[in-house]
């Protein structure tokens, strides 16, 4: 089949009704529901881009098995040019949503590619499990399916492990094995795009403890599998927000859901890992998942930072506070984060690593550094935007005010510096509010803090597993040698 069109994706959603709940009501057709229709339309747009002459060569490549054009994120890299092609594909999709779609399909397509490229932990489970992951990777690639994932246990009691929660299956675990597969019960979070995905893949962040074997499972199933239930967070936009008032929030909201597994049977051919705490913990590092996914997320994050910093500069220039030295310093600091991120991505491609499969992947250290930096850099950029725009950010009238009896007042008192009209100033400040004040922007910020797991432990790992420690120690030893001894 190969790369899908947007219409094929939407038809697929309609053909497979799933159990989705929002505001206490069950949703019949997610493509027609006001909370999901716009996100689904944007995902459809990404699929359509794969067929446009301007993007086709970057966004797709020839499948090694079928010869069909398939998504570039599935491509393993033989050369640096392949890594660059992957980066360009990530960038092309990311810029179409200004980096605001965190979980575009290329994220989990990349994950599957990483698993297929380095299947060591699945091979240790047995040949059948290695075949399962390989077959699943090819199945998703050839059918261009959209995946969501749920890696985290619900925040019931973080001081206890999964087995010690008030109920043994609050956290999703395997209730029993049958001849047909494993049966799962309990909850997982946080499935971004779950309501409009085709399939869900479940695996782990490292940190599962011995004794938690029933909770160590990696598998993938269609989201309409009987017993899979999704409870969505409150939507910010249910189709009622005007584009002028919420230019970003009305276009790029990503739905998020808690997944409940109500005794769900996962057939053996969809089980990748099971009952092995050691392998579940090693899976992340040994599949080099962090290299591959951080290449995609880093490129996407650059687009998001460029948007936010661009908006901050436009806000400052609109009311001419950009002449003040501290505003320039803040904007200069924000620009620095963009350039650091760009440098990390390019360095990762230059300092690529060779895999056991004979392929190459972007280097770990710069990408892990970037991943850690983003958790504080993006919130800092948003803080800078808040400081540059100050109280004006939240003072903006709506599109309706321009056409009302107070329209002349609005046009007079909301104008910007020089020739900048009220319409233009309000437009820019509303863009800023969507990023720096509105619930949509707060989610987008929380996303950068947490999408890669807990930033505290992540940044701490820069120290505990620093690959270039020897270079620091050598210089310290040299400097100490200067001091001699008393
Ligand atoms: C907008 C958004 C979208 C997301 N999308 C997805 C998705 O699509 N799929 C997915 O799987 N996940 C997704 N995530 C979830 C993300 O992976 C988690 O939020 C992240 O791993 C942190 O887990 P938590 O939220 O449960 O926080 P917790 O782990 O409960 O952390 C809460 C606080 O306690 C501290 N803490 C907790 N445990 C420890 C510990 N053992 N040691 C030290 N400190 C600790 C943390 O530092 C933090 O300050 C998303 C998150 C957000 C915000």
Image (tube, rainbow, N blue to C red):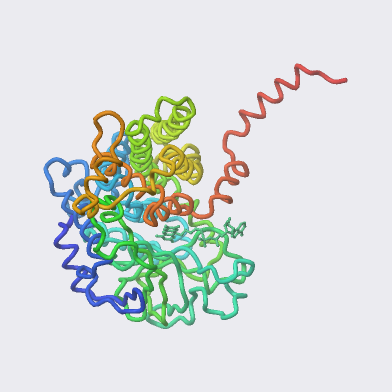
x 63%, y 69%: residue: 160
Taking the view exactly as shown, the residue that stands out farthest to the top is 482
User: For residue 3, which quarter of the picture?
Assistant: bottom left
x 44%, y 34%: residue: 334
Q: Position of residue 73 (x, y in %)?
A: 29, 48
Q: Is residue 86 visible?
A: no
User: For residue 324, which quarter of the picture?
Assistant: top left
Taking the view exactly as shown, the residue that stands out farthest to the left is 53
The vertical placement of 184 against 136, above or below, is below
The vertical placement of 26 against 464, above or below, is below
User: For residue 224, which quarter of the picture?
Assistant: bottom left
Q: Nearer the viewer, residue 386 or 151?
A: 386
Q: Is residue 214 visible?
A: yes
Instruction: Give the quadrant of the N terminus.
Output: bottom left
Q: Position of residue 346 (x, y in %)?
A: 39, 32
Q: Nearer the viewer, residue 128 or 195?
A: 195
Instruction: Give the quadrant of the C terminus.
Output: top right
Q: Nearer the viewer, residue 39 or 242?
A: 242
x 56%, y 62%: residue: 278
Q: Position of residue 197 (x, y in %)?
A: 29, 65
Q: Is residue 379 left or right of residue 416?
A: right
Q: Nearer the viewer, residue 405 or 321?
A: 405
């Amino acid at each position: 089949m190969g790369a899908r069109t947007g219409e094929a994706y939407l038809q697929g959603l309609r053909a497979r009704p799933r159990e989705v709940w929002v505001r206490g009501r069950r949703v019949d057709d997610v493509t027609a529901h006001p909370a999901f229709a716009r996100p689904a339309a944007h995902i459809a747009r990404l699929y359509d881009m794969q067929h446009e002459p301007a993007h086709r060569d970057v966004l797709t490549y020839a499948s090694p098995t079928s010869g069909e054009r398939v998504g570039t994120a599935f491509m393993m890299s033989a050369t640096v040019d392949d890594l660059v092609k992957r980066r360009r594909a990530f960038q092309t999709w990311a810029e179409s949503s200004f980096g605001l779609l965190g979980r575009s399909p290329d994220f989990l397509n990349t994950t599957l590619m990483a698993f297929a490229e380095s299947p060591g932990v699945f091979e240790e489970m047995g040949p059948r499990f290695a075949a399962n992951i390989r077959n699943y990777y090819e199945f998703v690639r050839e059918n261009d399916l959209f995946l969501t994932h749920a890696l985290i246990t619900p925040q019931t009691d973080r001081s206890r492990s999964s087995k010690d929660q008030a109920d043994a299956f609050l956290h999703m675990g395997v209730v029993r094995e049958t001849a047909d597969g494993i049966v799962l019960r309990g909850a997982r979070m946080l499935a971004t795009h779950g309501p409009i995905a085709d399939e869900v893949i479940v695996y782990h962040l490292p940190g599962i403890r011995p004794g938690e074997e029933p909770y160590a499972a990696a598998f993938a199933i269609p989201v309409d599998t009987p017993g899979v239930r999704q409870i969505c967070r409150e939507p910010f936009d249910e189709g009622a927000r005007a584009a002028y008032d919420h230019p970003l929030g009305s276009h790029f909201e990503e739905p998020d859901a808690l997944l409940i597994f109500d005794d769900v049977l996962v057939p053996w051919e969809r089980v990748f890992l099971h009952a092995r705490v050691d392998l579940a913990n090693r899976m992340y590092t040994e599949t080099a998942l962090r290299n591959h996914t951080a290449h995609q997320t880093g490129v996407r994050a650059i687009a998001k930072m460029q948007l936010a910093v661009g908006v901050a500069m436009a806000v400052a220039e609109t009311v001419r506070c950009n002449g003040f030295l501290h505003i320039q310093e803040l904007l200069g600091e924000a620009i620095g984060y963009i350039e650091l991120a760009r440098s990390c991505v390019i360095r990762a491609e230059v300092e690529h690593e060779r895999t056991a499969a004979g392929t190459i992947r972007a280097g770990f250290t710069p990408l892990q550094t970037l991943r850690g930096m983003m958790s504080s850099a993006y919130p800092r950029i948003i803080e800078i935007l808040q400081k540059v725009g100050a109280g004006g950010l939240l003072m903006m009238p709506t599109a309706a005010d321009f056409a009302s009896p107070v329209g002349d007042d609005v046009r007079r008192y909301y104008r910007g510096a020089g020739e900048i009209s009220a319409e233009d100033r309000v437009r820019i400040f509303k863009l800023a509010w969507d990023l720096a004040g509105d619930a949509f922007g707060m989610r987008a910020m929380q996303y950068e803090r947490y999408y890669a797991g807990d930033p505290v432990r992540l940044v701490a790992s820069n120290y505990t597993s620093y690959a270039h420690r020897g270079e620091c120690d050598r210089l310290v030893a040299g400097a100490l040698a200067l001091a001699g001894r008393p």
